[in-house]
Amino acid sequence: THKYLSSVSTPSSLSISSENWFQNFLSNSRFSLMGNCVCMISKNKKRNSKLVISDNLKKQTWDDLPSELLELILSRLIVADNIRASAVCKIWHSVATSVRVVNQSPWLMNIQKCSHWYEIYDPVQRKTHFIQFPELKDCRVCYTKEGWLLLYRWPQRYPFFFFNPFTRELIKLPRFDRTRKVEFAAFSCSPKSTGCVVFVAQDVSSTVLTISTCSPEANEWKTANYQKGSHFSYSALPQIVVFKGLFYCLSPTGWLGVFDPYDSTWSILEVLPPKCLESFSAKTCQPCEFFNEHEGHIFLIYVYFDEDPVIFKLDEALMEWKEVRTLDGAIFFISFLSCHSKTYIAGIMRNSVYFPKLLSNEKCCMSFSLDHHRYYLRENSNSRDLIELIGCDSIWIEAPEGFAGWM
Amino acid sequence: MAEEVSSQMNSLSISETNPSSSATISLVSGDDIVFKVEPTIAKEMETVQSFIDETDGKITTIPLPNISSHDLPYVIEYCEKSIAGKITKEFEAEFVKKLNNEEVKELFLAANYLNIKKLLDFLSQVIADRIANKSVEYVRRYFGIENDFTPEEEAKLREELAWTFTGVDPDDEDEN
């Protein structure tokens, strides 16, 4: 009996040299937590040996948890949890801030009609850059995404082109024969990434829509006519969101037309416009309507300055608009030509909607906080002049990561 | 009583007396309990596998002084499931339901020590879930961490980040 007991306590196959080797091995292994593990196997078994060991474990480990391990945990937290974690202690602060996902704020670009000078406003630094872009002379901005602008200049044989105001790169699109008035256009992703699709819709008649598509590498446009659908009428230009590769076009009457560039199909979604439109229509002034995508969902935002903005989320299962009272911390940047959503930006109010504003001829941005249920105008929180219209010749553009300004 | 111990020990230490069973590996917990496992399981535990490889498979008894006999069976269970390709969301949910916070922490360290990547990833998510939406004080208690900020530093942090400090779960919830 005694022999067996001792053989378990110190297994005979484990020689002293290999024990030493094992210790060396362990101290060299990745994320070694052991530090001063000396006793591999106790000679004298005691009832409370487990207790002693687990006490040692705790002392040896959580006090100086290697930052690689802490990173594994903290990198899985959402922003609010990450920020709280940064207040736990100094080590946690440095690890949490190093893994915190911080979005960059889009910048507000003021589209000029008669000057080469453009005002670009950075809402985090609260700084306006004045930049010359002769490339944009006589252009109409159609859409923006990932820092690129889709522009249109008529009359020219190659009227459509991409321009990146941050890098000043310019990419021409194939010759486009305009037979009718160009109505609305968009693109799916940066023209520098593969799979970029450019979408242009022209109004043929009250019932027929011509849709042309191409890619930046293509030699020509692909064009076809589609039945618009009885509900899809517009007095103002539809807004476009590219969602899961499809072009969702929102008519001012609240109906959604969807173009699928892969199957070349156009259809009207069977989703009734939100009910609030009826109550709005009783007023003298129409609300501003915006259309956005955030984390796999489509949102509709109605801004009417007498009241809080009304926000709807498309429930794809029930095919109906559901009103939401919070953006769960997200920030929406809305403008007529494009909208963006961000999860977290240092220095920008969370759970808010930001939009361009024209204030005494001066461009700035304004926000509505869903946490505080109120509008904010720049840093001064005076709510004067709220009734003025949203600046409609401004557009949010996404500055590249780390972009500090123009030389 | 002595007989019982003897027979238990006999079965535990069989690899040393019976060469034919050398195919199995003995993992020895920090409190000296031997766990016999299939060699395939070592493939999930990179630390153990490297140890076996380095000694050309001559050594099949591996001391794991940092892992207690309480935690080791959980690790083995997870690895066995992993080898069988049976790690499902349901299994993981059941697995973690059995564990209190203390055990999750210890298994996390064990997974790191044994270098079991899947278990490490899984448990870091479990820990993240358990500290999600909890107050700073709760997290400090959970990890046994001393606050090393000065009151001024902490006040400044809280002021800057005030919105994250409201609406967290009450501290007394899930305190175990």
Image (cartoon, coloured by chain):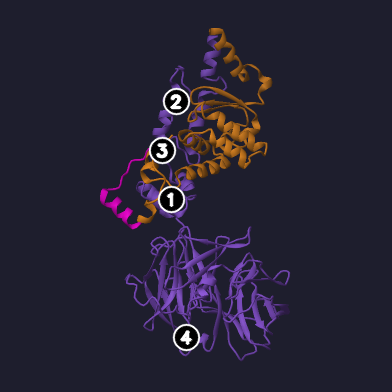
Evaluate whether residue B62 shows in this view.
yes
Q: Which residues are magenta?
A: B144-161
Between discs 4 and 3, the one toward the N terminus: 3
Chain A palette colour: purple
Chain letter of disc 4 in the image: A
Secondary structure of the residue carrying tag 3 is helix
- Mark 3 residue type: Trp
- Mark 1 residue type: Asp
Task: Give the residue pinned by disc 3.
Answer: A62
Q: B157 or B59: nearer the eye?
A: B157
Task: Give the residue pinned by disc 4.
Answer: A112
Foreground: disc 3 or disc 2:
3
Residue B116 spot, x, y in % from top left? 56, 39
Between discs 3 and 2, the one toward the N terminus: 2
Chain letter of disc 1 in the image: A
Task: Determine if the magenta segment contains residue B151.
Answer: yes
The Cα atoms of the two marked residues, 3 and 1, are separated by 20 Å
Residue A373 spot, x, y in % from top left? 40, 63
- Mark 2 residue type: Cys
Foreground: disc 4 or disc 3:
4
Q: A329 or B154: nearer the eye?
A: A329
The Cα atoms of the two marked residues, 1 and 4, are separated by 42 Å
Foreground: disc 2 or disc 1:
1
Q: Is residue A162 left or right of residue A106?
A: right
| Crowd around label 3: few <14 · some 14–19 · many ≥20 (10 Å) | some
Task: Answer whether labels 2 and 4 touch (C-beta < 8 Å).
Answer: no
Chain B palette colour: orange
Secondary structure of the residue carrying tag 4 is loop
The numbered disc on residue A154 is none
The Cα atoms of the two marked residues, 2 and 4, are separated by 76 Å
The Cα atoms of the two marked residues, 2 and 1, are separated by 39 Å
